[in-house]
C-alpha cells in the first residue's frame, strides 16, 4: 500500500509513534510518504520505500499566523496525486485531521477518493482539543475521518466523553521495537554517574506542566533521604528553568543531571534502576514503555492510560496524581535489592506484549478495512 503519514516532528510521543510506524511499514513493503514541516528526528533511516515531503509555508507580511493548515492540506493533495497514495494516516487531531479533511474534499472534487485515518494521541483530546477554541473543528474532523484509532482504552473513553462522536474508534496501543530498546551493557556510564553504587532514577519528558516534574523531583528528594541515589532528567521544554531552580532550592542540584533532548534514550535507560512518570494525564505513556523494554520498573501516577501499561505491583506501582509520599513508599519497595530483580524481569515481559511485530499487523489490517469500506461507499455513491 502507498501511505502518506502526517505528524509533528517531535522527539517523543506522537511524532515518534508515527515515524517508527512508517519505518516499520516500509520494511514490510509499503511505500511511505512522510509529510511534515521538518524532518522527524527518528527518521534517521531511508530505504527504497521511504520518502519525505516537507511542508513549505511561505511567509508574507500580512500573516501574523502563517496558514500552516492550508499549506499542509495542499501538500497532502500534491503527494496523493503525484505519488498515487492509497491512504492518508494523520497523527494528532489538531490540525492534521482537519487539514486531511480539506485535502480529501479537494481530491474528491477532482474525482479522486483517498481515505483518511486519524490517530488520537492524547493531548489533542484531553488538553488542547476540548478547549472551546478548537472543539468544533476537532469533533467534525474526527467524525469525518474514514478511520479513527486511539492509543489506549482510556483515550477512547475520554474522546466519547468530551466530544459528540458518532463513529467507532479502534484502540491500537503504542508499540516498542525491542531490537532497539533493550538493556545494553553500559557499566562505565553507570559508574561515571553513580560512582558509589547509588541507585539511578530517570525521568524523560517534554518538560510540560502536564508531566508534573516537581513530583518526580520531590520523589527523588525523599528517596535520597533513605538511600543514596542520583537522578537523570532527559528532555527539555517550558518547565526546565523552574525545575532547575527547584533542584537548587532543595540543595540536590549536584545529584540531578539535566541531559536535554537525547536521541539515544535507550542508552540512559540501560543504566536506570527506576523510571518516574507522575503525570497529571497520560493517554499511554510511551516513555514508560521504552523504560520497561530496558528492564526499568515504573513508578507512575494512575492517570489516563497508565494503568493499561504499568501493572500495579508487577511492573512497578501506580499512585494517585500528586501523592508524592505514596510514590516514595513504592519506589523504596521496588529499589530494595531483594525486590528489584523481579520487577526488572517483569518490566521486560510486559514490554514484550507491546512488541512492534504484534501491533504492526493491527494497523495493516485496519488500513485494509478502511480502504475497502471507503471504496465500497464511493461505488454506492456512483450507483445512486
Ligand atoms: O506527552 C506529550 O505531551 C506528547 C504527546 C504527543 O502528542 O506527542 O504524547 C502523547 O502521545 C504519546 C504517543 O501516543 C503518548 O504516549 C503520551 O502518553 C501522550 N501524552 C499525553 O497524553 C500527555
Image: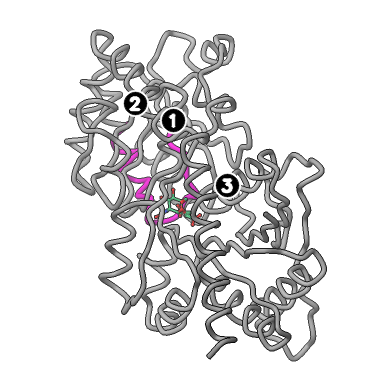
| Residue 247 pos. (x, y %) | 41, 39
Q: Evaluate if marks 3 and 1 touch, with contact meaning CB atoms under 8 Å apart.
A: no
Which image quadrant is residue 231 in?
A: top left
Q: Nearer the viewer, residue 166 or 224?
A: 166
The residue that appears at 68% across and 85% down in the rendered structure is: 106
The answer to if 219 sits in the magenta stretch is yes
Q: Is residue 97 left or right of residue 277?
A: right
Instruction: Identify whether 158 is placed above or below 247.
Output: below
| Residue 274 pos. (x, y %) | 36, 25
The residue that appears at 29% across and 36% down in the rendered structure is: 310
The answer to if 239 sits in the magenta stretch is no
Magenta stretch, residue numbers: 202-220
Q: Nearer the viewer, residue 328 or 152?
A: 152
Q: Which residue lies under the disc numbered 2?
A: 297
| Residue 55 pos. (x, y %) | 75, 68
Q: Which residue lies under the disc numbered 1?
A: 291
Instruction: Identify whether 229 is placed above or below 19.
Output: above
Mark 2 burial class by Cα count in 10 Å: few <14, some 14-19, many 20+:
many
Q: Evaluate if marks 3 and 2 touch, with contact meaning CB atoms under 8 Å apart.
A: no
Say if disc 3 is inside 8 Å of ligand 1: yes
The tally of labels here is 3
Q: Is residue 98 left or right of residue 57?
A: left
Q: Is residue 76 left or right of residue 373?
A: right
Q: Which residue lies under the disc numbered 3?
A: 16
Amino acid at each position: 500500500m502507498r501511505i502518506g503519514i502526517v505528524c509533528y516532528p517531535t522527539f517523543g510521543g506522537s511524532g515518534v509513534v508515527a515515524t517508527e510506524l512508517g519505518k516499520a511499514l516500509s520494511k514490510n513493503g509499503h511505500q511511505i510518504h512522510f509529510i511534515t514541516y521538518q524532518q522527524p528526528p527518528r527518521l534517521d533511516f531511508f530505504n527504497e520505500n521511504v520518502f519525505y515531503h516537507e511542508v513549505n509555508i511561505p511567509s508574507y507580511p500580512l500573516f501574523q499566523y502563517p496558514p500552516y493548515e492550508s499549506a499542509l492540506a495542499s501538500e497532502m493533495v500534491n503527494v496523493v496525486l503525484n505519488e498515487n497514495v492509497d491512504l492518508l494516516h494523520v497523527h494528532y487531531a489538531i490540525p492534521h485531521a482537519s487539514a486531511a479533511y480539506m485535502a480529501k474534499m479537494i481530491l474528491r472534487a477532482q474525482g479522486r477518493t483517498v481515505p483518511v485515518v486519524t490517530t488520537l494521541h492524547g493531548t489533542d483530546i484531553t488538553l488542547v482539543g476540548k478547549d472551546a477554541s478548537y472543539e468544533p473543528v476537532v469533533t467534525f474532523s474526527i467524525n469525518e475521518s474514514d478511520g479513527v484509532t486511539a492509543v489506549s482504552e482510556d483515550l477512547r473513553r475520554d474522546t466519547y466523553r468530551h466530544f459528540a462522536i458518532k463513529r467507532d474508534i479502534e484502540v491500537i496501543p503504542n508499540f516498542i521495537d525491542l531490537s532497539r530498546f533493550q538493556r545494553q551493557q553500559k557499566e562505565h556510564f553507570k559508574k561515571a554517574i553513580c560512582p558509589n553504587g547509588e541507585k539511578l532514577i530517570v525521568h524523560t519528558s517534554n518538560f510540560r506542566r502536564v508531566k508534573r516534574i516537581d513530583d518526580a523531583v520531590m520523589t527523588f528528594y525523599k528517596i535520597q533521604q533513605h538511600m543514596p541515589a542520583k537522578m537523570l532528567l532527559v528532555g527539555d521544554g517550558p518547565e526546565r528553568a523552574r525545575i532547575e531552580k527547584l533542584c537548587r532550592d532543595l540543595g540536590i542540584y549536584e545529584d540531578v543531571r539535566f541531559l536535554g533532548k537525547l536521541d539515544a534514550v535507550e542508552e540512559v535507560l540501560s543504566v536506570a534502576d527506576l523510571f518516574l512518570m507522575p503525570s497529571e494525564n497520560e493517554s499511554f505513556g510511551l516513555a514508560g514503555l521504552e523504560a520497561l523494554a530496558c528492564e526499568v520498573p515504573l513508578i507512575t501516577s494512575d492517570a489516563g492510560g497508565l494503568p493499561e501499561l504499568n501493572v500495579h505491583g508487577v511492573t512497578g506501582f501506580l499512585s494517585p496524581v500528586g501523592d508524592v509520599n505514596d510514590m516514595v513508599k513504592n519506589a523504596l519497595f521496588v529499589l530494595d535489592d531483594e525486590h528489584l530483580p523481579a520487577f526488572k524481569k517483569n518490566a521486560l515481559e510486559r514490554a514484550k506484549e507491546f512488541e512492534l511485530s504484534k501491533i504492526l499487523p493491527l494497523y495493516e489490517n485496519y488500513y485494509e478495512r478502511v480502504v475497502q469500506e471507503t471504496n465500497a461507499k464511493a461505488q454506492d455513491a456512483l450507483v445512486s
